[in-house]
Image (spheres, rainbow, N blue to C red):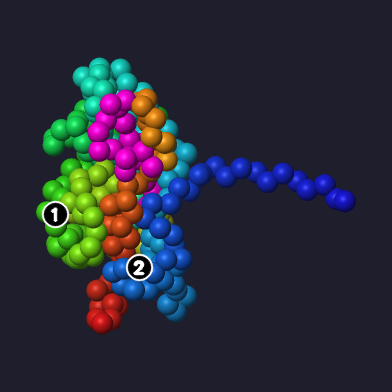
Amino acid sequence: MPKIKPRKPDADDNLRHGGFATNTCPRCHYVRNKKEKGKLLHGIPELTDSAKLRSVVGQIKDNLMQDKSLVRDPEAVFMMGVLEARISGGEYYLYASSGRTAAPWIQPKHLDGITYHPGKWKLADPAIPANNRGWLTVRGEKVDLGADIQGVSRPCSAVKLLLGLGGMHLDWKSVDYLRMSEMVYVGPKAEDAKHMRTWHGHGATNSWTAHSCDACEARIPYLICDVPPNWIETP
């Protein structure tokens, strides 16, 4: 038999947040990878992460581990995330935090040592809607989320990043990419944090893990939809 050449590992893990490109979008009701006249309807059919973004969030994590005011509490649960996008030729680099305190707890000192686009990272800290009404897509369009989403107002870093991008109201002509990476800290005695331990088990040790929670998985598809409102047929 001929030898099979080993497949070269992907440079990116391409972790999906909020489902897959083949899912139907809950906002516009098109399949998220559907094309119309040769053009992809969704400029962002799915969110992926990348090795380079993970290096950024990993550097922030290393800096945070030296900040005992953050990790000394055994009941602590907090999250951080970073996003990069190239839209209509412009490049954007955002970071966000959630949990522990209402105010952003990532400080400039926690960004020390980042080698990927150093100095270009901007804080995203938008207000989170109190219910399913009045959210912003990444294109800056208003959208109401599904009424049955549990934890719809949870102020996770993922939705802060996407709402922060939408709040820029960018000139939306083309999307080259939008990527995001997240990391969560779960203290050894954290309570009510099962949704944060989805990928890391339920052991009684503190852990860093990276994924979107159930509420984000439900909200993200609405927020990444960039189909213009006049293309959406009302039921």
Which of the two residues, 222 or 186, is positioned nearer the viewer here? 186
Which residues lie in the magenta part?
Answer: 178-198
| Apparent side of residue 73 relative to residue 178 in the rendered image (left or right) | left
Does residue 73 appear in this view?
yes
Residue 189 falls within the magenta-colored stretch: yes
Task: Tell me the residue that label 2 is attached to.
Answer: 25
Indicate which disc residue 83 carries: none
Answer with the quarter of the image where residue 54 lies: top left
| Apparent side of residue 166 relative to residue 7 in the rendered image (left or right) | left
Secondary structure of the residue carrying numbered label 2: loop
What residue lies at 47% left-to-right and 75% top-to-bottom?
Answer: 38
Does residue 63 appear in this view?
no
Looking at the picture, how far across and down is residue 171, in whole percent?
26, 61
Q: Is residue 20 above or below residue 2?
A: below
What residue lies at 68% left-to-right and 46% top-to-bottom?
Answer: 7
Indicate which disc residue 129 carries: 1
Estimate how packed mark 1 is, as few (under 14), some (14 to 19) or many (20 or more) residues with alpha carbons within 10 Å. some
What residue lies at 44% left-to-right and 62% top-to-bottom?
Answer: 21
Estimate how packed mark 2 is, as few (under 14), some (14 to 19) or many (20 or more) residues with alpha carbons within 10 Å. many
Answer with the quarter of the image where residue 39 lies: bottom left
Residue 96 falls within the magenta-colored stretch: no
Q: Residue furthest right?
A: 1
Type of residue at label 1?
A: Pro
Tags 2 and 1 in contact by the CB under 8 Å rule?
no
What whole-number distance in Å separates the C-alpha atoms at marks 2 and 1? 21 Å
Looking at the picture, how far across and down is residue 165, in whole percent?
25, 52
Q: Is residue 190 above or below residue 157?
A: above
Quarter holding the C terminus is bottom left
